[in-house]
Amino acid sequence: MKTSIATVSINGTLKEKIIAVANAGFDGVEIFENDFLTNNLSPKEVTKIVKDSGLEITLFQPFRDFEGMPDNHRIRAFDRAKRKFDIMQELETDLVLICSNTSNISLGGIDRAADDFYELGEIAKERSIKIGYEALAWGKYVNDHRDAWEIVRRANHKNVGIILDSFHTLSKKIDLKSISSIPAEKIFIVQLADAPYYEMDLLYWSRHFRNMPGQGDLPITDFMTYLNQTGYDGYLSLEIFNDNYRSGPRELIAKDGKRSLISLINETDKKKKNTTIIHNIEFIEFALEEKNLELLENFLIMLGFKEIGKHKSKSIKLFIFDDVKIILNYENTILVKEGRKQGPSLYAFGIKVNDIKSLLHNAKSLDIDFVRKDSNQSMDVINNIDGSIYIVDHNSSNVWKKEFNLQEKNLSNEFDLKIDHIAQTLHQDEMSSALLSYTTLLGTKKSPIFDIIDPSGITKSQIIENEEQTFRMTINGADNKNTIAGKFLENKQGSGIQHVALSTNNLIELVKKLNNQGQEFLKISKNYYDDIEARFGLDYEFCKELERLNILYDEDDSGSFLQIYTPVFNDNFFFEFVQRINDYKGYGASNALFRIAAQKYANDN
Amino acid sequence: MKTSIATVSINGTLKEKIIAVANAGFDGVEIFENDFLTNNLSPKEVTKIVKDSGLEITLFQPFRDFEGMPDNHRIRAFDRAKRKFDIMQELETDLVLICSNTSNISLGGIDRAADDFYELGEIAKERSIKIGYEALAWGKYVNDHRDAWEIVRRANHKNVGIILDSFHTLSKKIDLKSISSIPAEKIFIVQLADAPYYEMDLLYWSRHFRNMPGQGDLPITDFMTYLNQTGYDGYLSLEIFNDNYRSGPRELIAKDGKRSLISLINETDKKKKNTTIIHNIEFIEFALEEKNLELLENFLIMLGFKEIGKHKSKSIKLFIFDDVKIILNYENTILVKEGRKQGPSLYAFGIKVNDIKSLLHNAKSLDIDFVRKDSNQSMDVINNIDGSIYIVDHNSSNVWKKEFNLQEKNLSNEFDLKIDHIAQTLHQDEMSSALLSYTTLLGTKKSPIFDIIDPSGITKSQIIENEEQTFRMTINGADNKNTIAGKFLENKQGSGIQHVALSTNNLIELVKKLNNQGQEFLKISKNYYDDIEARFGLDYEFCKELERLNILYDEDDSGSFLQIYTPVFNDNFFFEFVQRINDYKGYGASNALFRIAAQKYANDN
């Protein structure tokens, strides 16, 4: 299927929009009428730009309030349509979208509407124009694609067909089976949009919150499954109204759109389905200058890490605590590359995957920046908007033994320490773009977005996990530079890993041991412990111990959760230690505001 | 009635919040539990800060999921309540809010809930604590204050009363008469919040969009009318959940809250009702350096203005066109005061009012910055967040004749030119604060907020008018610095007047005359005229004339509207000329995107 996007989906002048659409690799572009009307170019000039960019105009839209108009208004509506046909002919485009009437003066009746469309179809035929009828979810009489289809069916005119839009159908939870019986040749184009799930007025939801397939919560793949049953092989065209896209980076948003369509097409094609399995998060990596090495090493040693090896040829050290590997990279090249001169920076993590070739193939089709290893670099790397991800192939020989001189062989596994999850922080308007790479390339799932209340604003948070929960991550979007997340972005000079959570099978003993070595943790308010004791009905002594140790507590339906935070290192990262008891699934989200308040307090005092 | 606000309504740490509340002049503060729990101060320390600030704690809130719990959960709920009572006693506060249960495991039944409240009332009585029960609009069984009142009535316990919240009642459009029959002594506190009208899930609406009474669209004054019938004279307490307030300027938001309550109290008191009448917008005033005088004078002269006088003692000139007065102020003092050294700046306007003393009195009670005239200044001035407004008293002698040497006496009134409206531009998060001054002090009405699509973002716009339509204004909130509104803010270094619309009785002739003098206007795309001809069914020749002249067209139910824009002067202001035909009421909002696109085009080329 070919890909298209409506000009309303991105910002800029009409010319800027068309160029961004072409650069993102779409095959076609829908011209949103207001973008044409407000622009100073003539139809012929617009057409030339479109053609020169290698695109075609897939649709001219929308034409409103056409069918079922009474008396004089009906005559006016036909006149208006003819005028628009004039412009379409100058634009050399042959498909117009007529959306269902929302006017209060319009009249209902399937046959009345069908007659109007037949009559307009005759006019359109003379000009070789095709009319696509779309049911708006808030149309006055027609607000369901099944009714729109019945009108098209009764109009029974070669030049009149239906336009399906995933938002209008899915937002109203209309039975999708009804799609599969529409003849493919009567579906003139298919518009796609996703949206986060909010219970709100459909019009308001649609005009402000639509997003790319895969970024929201609507079951777009189900929609595609039934669409595929019709045999439709025309354009899939994005029509996204989103407040953030109206001011966000145009080229990036267009590329995300293209990526979302490719992923959606692959997902509904068994042969192309994403088969990537992430085995685990294999390591995290700091970039730093040699002069800062001691500082960071001491921080890690206080947390129980041990240096166990040096790279055979590069300025790289490997630290380990049980199953957690940390790389300290003080090669000059990495610093230049990262441009981070503000002290140690936790700039990347590595994942171990089942099949690196298939991952590379997917990255290519999704236009994701995937850099193969070379003489300077011993691993492949994905460059995402929020940082770098190294890829370790599960099938390749042991990279650690091969490249490092390892000093110790028999390491204990006293605390069963593993990397539990990575917490990325980024700007709120980067979240949906970052998310899309994880879901499309790595085949992960996502939670809905939830709010974390910071004393200085709201941080939006979203969980990204794979099915096997061997890859867990949170992405956290800062809304301003005064929140803890926002200050982090400022200190780090951009998006990146804010903290890493390490899981253990015995947090209390681990914390006691580290305390004995002199390690301190983030101090939590006494008021918190009074509350959780009452809230969860905790044992008094147990709760007192949590308070003494500054451990936070949570519960879900399956189990309970302990978590503790280190102080912030170098203003730009910290560790969390967690213990998941009895299959607790969450991330302690309800404790986030306590962590943030405590960090703010520690920072201010 | 005394005033209070919940700590959740503004941002900061608990201590910062309490201090801001005190500085804004509230009598009391509600402690929102999470603000207490996340803070590092003990209850005693919090109480000391509250008392030292001259406040009292009006309420501790919320306590959730209490009534109607089964078995063990019921025991736990009572235990939890006792623990909260402990904290309340340490905080030395006697009123707790229990909101209606939202838990899926809770059980319904008025009597069951009443029994729970009686039993808890007995426990509370021993500790001299009062329990206020509030119906959340999304409570599982109780989501209507009438049901909450019935439970309180049946509990029949001195220590159990009801808490009313305007949002929960008004968002569900519950009959307000039901309030007036509740005995005043059983209403333990009243919480107030307004909200813009959106059709969305009540919980989502409530948690993100609440705002101060008068800033939204809910009929809060009706709510107050029925509340007053009960004889209630306790606290009015703001409880506002608003995403913008979570990051906005704390002190300003607190002051707005206090202002909104004072205005609401005055509005429902006939003796204190706002009686200000604005006769007209009397003039606009530029501040500039003498070296820029010629530039601006030429701009005005090209638009048909004539210099008709100089100030008797100051460096001030008066320009007039029919009924429109423009002051050019090149006194050094004004420039120093305004700190605007970027060329001529349209920094203020003047209004003529019926009674300046009553206005001054209101400004005082509303804590609005109202500066009386002094030796340096011949008029009183209101300093609002978006700029200065001079006040001319309708009853005082003619300020122009008194202070100016007027050169011409017989001026024609060929085009009946008047100031139609002022268009202010400000940052989006300043809009609700700016609005509040206009509605509370000047007694104006406001439209809902609507979106203006800019190629680089969304500008929010709202109309402010008085009943008589002798005062008209639009406030326009920029979301980023790339929109036309945002660039204006950057060039102007802050909020202010972006343009002034002047109305005439013959726009076409006026434009022709000015064109003949060599004046050019903002060029509008040809595509626009093709569209309006079809859209409004306009006469071909008429439409061609509009196109030649670059005049925009609009219609509403009452009439039609012509409008045209001058080029932008000095990157920071422009004029609009309008003609209202047959009582057209609007502002040509649907043309705003064409104006903005044309300005962007003119700017880029």
Image (cartoon, coloured by chain):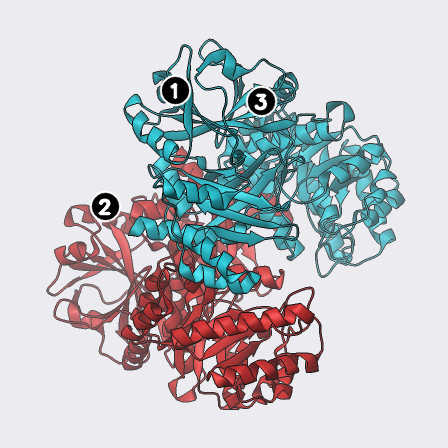
Chain colours: A red, B cyan
Q: Residues within 10 Å of mark 3 (few under 14, many from 20)?
A: some
Horizontal side of residue A522 vs B98, given as left or right: left
Q: Position of residue A502 (x, y in %)?
A: 39, 59
- Amino acid identity at mark 3: Ser
State how far apart marks 1 and 3 are (Cα).
38 Å
Task: Answer with the quarter of the image where residue A105 lies.
Answer: bottom right
Residue B137 to residue A283: above or below: above
Residue B152 marker: none
Residue B334 marker: 1
Question: Of tags 1 and 2, which is closer to the observer?
Answer: 1
- Amino acid identity at mark 2: Gln
Q: Position of residue B27 (x, y in %)?
A: 65, 25
Residue B386 to residue B382: above or below: below
The residue under label 2 is A342
Secondary structure of the residue carrying tag 1 is helix
State how far apart marks 1 and 2 are (Cα).
45 Å
The residue under label 3 is B53
Q: Position of residue B464 (x, y in %)?
A: 59, 38
Q: Are marks 2 and 3 on the same chain?
A: no
Residue A586 to residue A89: above or below: above
Q: Are marks 1 and 2 in contact (CB under 8 Å)?
A: no
